[in-house]
Amino acid sequence: MTPVSFRSDNVAGVAPEILAAIGAANGGTAPSYGTDPLTAQLQERFGQLFETKVRVAPVATGTAANALSLSLLAGPYGAVMCSATAHINDSECGAGEFFTGGAKLVTLASRHGKLQPDALEHALATAGIGMTHRVQPQLLSVTEGTERGTLYQLDELRELFAIAKRFGLRIHMDGARFANALAALRCSPAELTWKLGVDVLSFGATKNGAMCTDAVVVFDPGLFDELGFRARRAGQVFSKMRFLSAQLLAYVEGGLWLRLADNANATAARLARGLEALSGVTLVDPVEINEVFATMPPGMIEGLKAAGMGFHDRGGGHIRAVTAFDTTEEQVDAFLAAAARHAD
Amino acid sequence: MTPVSFRSDNVAGVAPEILAAIGAANGGTAPSYGTDPLTAQLQERFGQLFETKVRVAPVATGTAANALSLSLLAGPYGAVMCSATAHINDSECGAGEFFTGGAKLVTLASRHGKLQPDALEHALATAGIGMTHRVQPQLLSVTEGTERGTLYQLDELRELFAIAKRFGLRIHMDGARFANALAALRCSPAELTWKLGVDVLSFGATKNGAMCTDAVVVFDPGLFDELGFRARRAGQVFSKMRFLSAQLLAYVEGGLWLRLADNANATAARLARGLEALSGVTLVDPVEINEVFATMPPGMIEGLKAAGMGFHDRGGGHIRAVTAFDTTEEQVDAFLAAAARHAD
Amino acid sequence: MTPVSFRSDNVAGVAPEILAAIGAANGGTAPSYGTDPLTAQLQERFGQLFETKVRVAPVATGTAANALSLSLLAGPYGAVMCSATAHINDSECGAGEFFTGGAKLVTLASRHGKLQPDALEHALATAGIGMTHRVQPQLLSVTEGTERGTLYQLDELRELFAIAKRFGLRIHMDGARFANALAALRCSPAELTWKLGVDVLSFGATKNGAMCTDAVVVFDPGLFDELGFRARRAGQVFSKMRFLSAQLLAYVEGGLWLRLADNANATAARLARGLEALSGVTLVDPVEINEVFATMPPGMIEGLKAAGMGFHDRGGGHIRAVTAFDTTEEQVDAFLAAAARHAD
Amino acid sequence: MTPVSFRSDNVAGVAPEILAAIGAANGGTAPSYGTDPLTAQLQERFGQLFETKVRVAPVATGTAANALSLSLLAGPYGAVMCSATAHINDSECGAGEFFTGGAKLVTLASRHGKLQPDALEHALATAGIGMTHRVQPQLLSVTEGTERGTLYQLDELRELFAIAKRFGLRIHMDGARFANALAALRCSPAELTWKLGVDVLSFGATKNGAMCTDAVVVFDPGLFDELGFRARRAGQVFSKMRFLSAQLLAYVEGGLWLRLADNANATAARLARGLEALSGVTLVDPVEINEVFATMPPGMIEGLKAAGMGFHDRGGGHIRAVTAFDTTEEQVDAFLAAAARHAD
């Protein structure tokens, strides 16, 4: 068994199928900067996947995906409404502010990482829309599945988006764990995105088995060209783009992405069940995708560390453990066994 | 023989040694966002390579390398002095302006892609340094080897940098083809960079066999931390950084990078010699690295296209042909043979 | 009696002494863009006033003063710590984000518009200083007197600044009502600014009798030059600068600014005393400068409006009334009489 | 006679009618931030003046007018085509780059400060429109009258604008000396602007007798709201806006602006005639508004300085002399007499 690290899903490597696709893409020359056949194929393939015409721009990081998305939807005097726990707000070093030319991220209280309709309604109703001394709400950004390992149900998104649309906002979805959400919700990519009103999606792949490859997926044809220029200007158009497109094609081929996500979700569920059975452990948030947030006794935290178990010690007795596409039940059980040795 | 495409060196794939390194990096988990062992090793290795302490930030594109470099050295009211033919000026969709917060690229006339000392001296002397209504020259950016396939000799750089330093400017080197330059000049990385006064280097690897991986190399310790934040904010810090660091380590291991560049340079020289022997063909710029700029009769251009030879038709009888790390003599000779069939 | 408008102190006109100074400055020609004698004199005069060498840049709005100040002290990946009620946060349409190139304003809870030391300490301790995925706290911005009509005592500022300095932050003071604060605190300009550690001051004058003229006052000589360039680039260097400098000179001449502020403060105090004596009226915040925040019955609000009394109806029974440099006791008493007619 | 300073038209003071209007605006309170009656009146008045619905935003500097205008018409990956001699390019410290979020100013050769149709056509035809690695031409900016004291005839503008429109560009006119141009061309404001296709006009007033007051005039209703937010965010919305609006109303009242401009133009013409009659003096550019560019012998330049005559010594025997709204024939003749004493 390889060492257990549940610190994040991004400590994992690359899925074998995706690595193979990289190798297969390496024969001969190919036109550069996205004019290659694989990138053309990617556009088609994602069009089928999402059941509508889309523009896909492969990017090298989730931060780039988010920041580019924001810049397509929020102008320099705009406000982006998001949860205080949103990755764009607290973990991207201000990339959103940078790419938008200084839009303001307005953070709202959330419950288990999920925006609450009444808070959104109140914020928009008091935002001073039309008043020039206030930044103007232009965009709602939701993360699905959330940074707290939870899920918005489709109806919950529908309600939030209805409020946002009523105030004239556009919609961005941070899908860093989009596959995990989709796998858990058992709905189609279209149902979780544009059919609800999503304008632009940050399509995560890196956390779920790709190698430094995520994507911006744009549903609004009016933004297709702008995406190209903004990505180029941001240093996110790759001369050897085929190597990113090949990954994304392999990622969705034959449902690989959902199988990988299923594994991450299932092992997280196993971990959650095991942990909450331990005396002294409490799950802080519902475990709906592949992240487990829990409190545990100090001794258990120290014991896990001593046993070489990787996880995120968030301080104050709080931990986060994230499973990945390649996490095994054996690893989960090893983690649980180590924890059990230090249960009260 | 695989089809001949000399359109650019970025139409090539990935060198086998580098692809192997990616695969080798894929075992087990690794800390994310550059805290992994390979990235630590990269810092050490490049320190040895450059014979001084450096900070290396792997990035996914040459544009990102350049734009980040500029942002470290030029402030929002700064001017960046560069050649009108500089990639930062005419091929990066304004990334430099974006990352610097609106610095101005001031373009100077060049000869064969090389800045001329008198033009630089004149521009700086008349730039209105200290006058608040003028943008302030803060940075000289040179490309080595140049976008026109030529090289600055060390003495030429020394002269330019002396002028720049006299006016208080800092120095950036766009080394998109740094290996090609180094291989041709037969000097050390240190001699071509910080020993001459270079503050920040865009270290190219993608054009010479890497997969979407270049780097910013900073020589000024005062900028080390800022590099980290700016890269993060630009979406250029990778959760699975090990896959970029592994490439850069493999790239320089045992002198691979110079061997790859030697091949590109040598095949370009062979191509240049063959072309200039043909009636009606004239080399427009000295061929000092791996790019050939030439004029040729319309019939030859059409004939090459008809023969399936890839190159860049620049219009008006001008062509650019670029060889790569894996170009073969056989490919060059096939190109020459096709051209010869259409010589006057 | 002219109509009573306590909607804001910026609905007032220009003090006669300042209008006269504008007229006096109008004789003949003067060098442009701040090279005129009055602007030179302004530097000297403010140096005396603040008992240290300063650089003063007259600007046309308080927003410009604030945004320029922020841009001198917070970089593009920086965080500016401020109260959620700060003018820079909620009333300047994102000017701070614009001028800094996308710094993030991190808002803290406040009490009566005043930042609390424990909240600041906690925010900084958990801000992830040194972690590249977090924006980096670089600046504390306080408003003195506050947007809620209250004052920080010198000791309170000292405590906040000590915390900020301990974490490496610099200090900005938004002095939109600096004269009102100074007049109330009875301390010297130096004591309220650089002696406490303020690096840059937004020096308000417009609200207290000037005509579209405020200033940035920089105490750190290392920022003097940058101020000039940033102001020029922001369209805040005036070809006919003498007309702004003349106002600022007249404003402080013979203590005019403090006399004007005294009047505003005194009339606000009179208004507050009168209001709180009315049944159904409660002062929401201590009235320490020239702003009165109160709750009152709906009938009183409507009655005041019907009587032609100007004030800011903030909704939900909350009102704001602001007195100015030229407010008369007669006006205050008229307002109070109208209110009294609708008291319970 | 007051001293003679022809260094610039911005060394002059304020026209008496405009100063009086400032004083007249000072009675009582007025709603702030542009909601006052004078600012409403300004919108109406300029609508009549331009014979179409416009939105006027008073601003404090010409640089602010230009930079705001550019930001309305050119996006962050845009290119602004302008003359190398354009004020936006060489005299505004990069304000255009700042306000647009990093658009690129692409400078074209000009003759006597005027863009040439063939140069514009060539630049646009080779700009790589639609290619993501190139900034995209979005805006043509012309200065009327030019920085070299010349005028585009209406037909010349029509030709330039037709080219620009054919390539999809929008049109900005820097009218820092709009009144001088209008007075010389004897056409209507509408004929010189929107009827030719101008989208946004920088309406200069300061150089022609106003006090730190220019304006952005927008003809495209689709940009009206954005102007308000961008101006606010740039610190160019004044709490006491009435004092700027009053000036602009007085400026155009009864044709004052054209009378003032006529005087400047006429005295410049007188100066030009006198100078070119002197041995050793050559006019470098046609004198079509109120600026005279000439070469003269070193002795004459020194002699003028010794005589206390103000002008701009541009080096190498080149001088610029600019007359103003209040320049007298007596002053011109004094200047000419001093020059004559040093003619060959």
Image: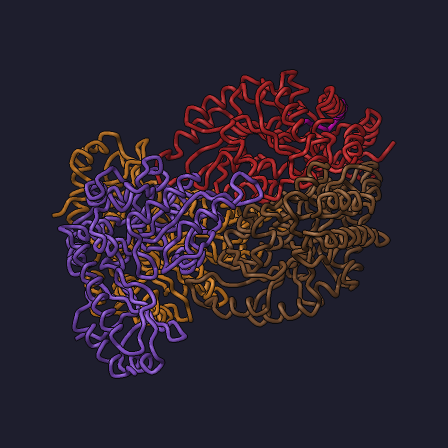
Chain colours: A orange, B purple, C red, D brown
The image shows residue B152, relative to residue C104, as above or below, that is below
Per the image, is C279 magenta?
A: yes
Instruction: Give the residue at the far right of this rendering.
Output: C1
Q: Is residue A252 left or right of residue B77?
A: left
Q: Is residue B144 left or right of residue C214?
A: left
Q: Residue C341's spot in the image, x, y percent?
A: 83, 31
Residue that appears at 33% across and 83% down: B299
Q: Is residue A244 left or right of residue D32?
A: left
Residue that appears at 25% across and 65% down: A250
Foreground residue, B47 or D249? B47
* Count of numbered marks: 0
Q: Is residue D123 visible?
A: yes
Per the image, is B163 magenta?
A: no
What quarter of the picture does the C terminus of chain A occupy? top left
Q: Residue A97's spot in the image, x, y percent?
A: 47, 47
Foreground residue, C282 or D249? D249
Residue B329 placement: quadrant: bottom left
Q: Which residues are magenta?
A: C270-285
Q: Residue B124's spot in the image, x, y percent?
A: 47, 45
The image shows residue A24, relative to residue D87, as above or below, that is below
